[in-house]
Image (spheres, helix red, strand yellow):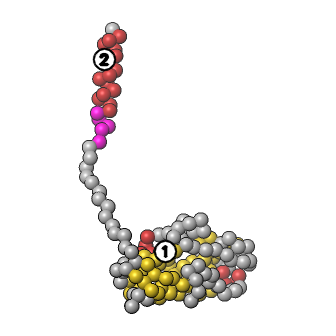
Amino acid sequence: MNKTIIAASLTAAMTIFASTANAADGTITFKGAIDSSTCNVSINGGNKDATVNLPKVSANLLAEKNKVAGATNFNMILSNCSGTANSVLAFFEAGANVDSVTGNLKNNGTAANVQVQLMDADGKVLKAGDTSQTAGKTVKLTAGNGTLTYAAQYFATDKVEAGDVDTSVTYSINYL
């Protein structure tokens, strides 16, 4: 009797596992390229690591959620570019300072309910860490040089309370 029960149990177990087995339906191949292109980068004529000073604005301008103020342009100046790239764009990386929902930069300063929002040269909002940035504006390199123009502005997540704003973002240059 025990042999019959064991055999029946094994048969049932094999039937269960057989019905959940999956067949391979296809293959995904990933291809890419690594380019030797590099450029010297300066922000607003300074170093590759720089500070962009946003203007002091009244909290009254940011009294409601989604209000913006203080748009400030900054230039990423590329020079002495080598390699085969013909055009470039900057990619603003995700990181500890990036709000994963809005893609804006979280404030580490004393002002409350405010973030810093990035924009391209046309004023289109960029979400840091989001691949939609790569569909943005590229700049052609001319004689190994080019200038990428972006902007940053205050963004109210609710009624803003006065204080300092301090945040940062890491960027990389994409060579196309």
Q: Toward the viewer: 85 or 167?
A: 85
Q: Toward the viewer: 69 or 176?
A: 176
- Quick one: label 1 or label 2, which is nearer the N terminus? 2
Residue range in magenta is 18-22
**Residue 123 visible:** no
User: Which quadrant of the view contains residue 132?
Assistant: bottom left
Q: Left or right? Give the position of 12 relative to 125.
A: left
- For label 2, count other residues whose C-alpha is less than 10 Å away and answer few (under 14), some (14-19) or many (20+): few
Residue 52, image x, y percentages: 62, 83
Which residue is identified by label 1?
172
> What secondary structure is found at the residue carrying circle 2?
helix
Q: Nearer the viewer, mark 1 or mark 2?
A: 1
Q: Is residue 116 magenta?
A: no
The amino acid sitting under disc 1 is Ser
Residue 39, image x, y percentages: 46, 81
Which residue is identified by label 2?
7
Q: Toward the viewer: 176 or 55?
A: 176
Residue 150, image x, y percentages: 51, 84
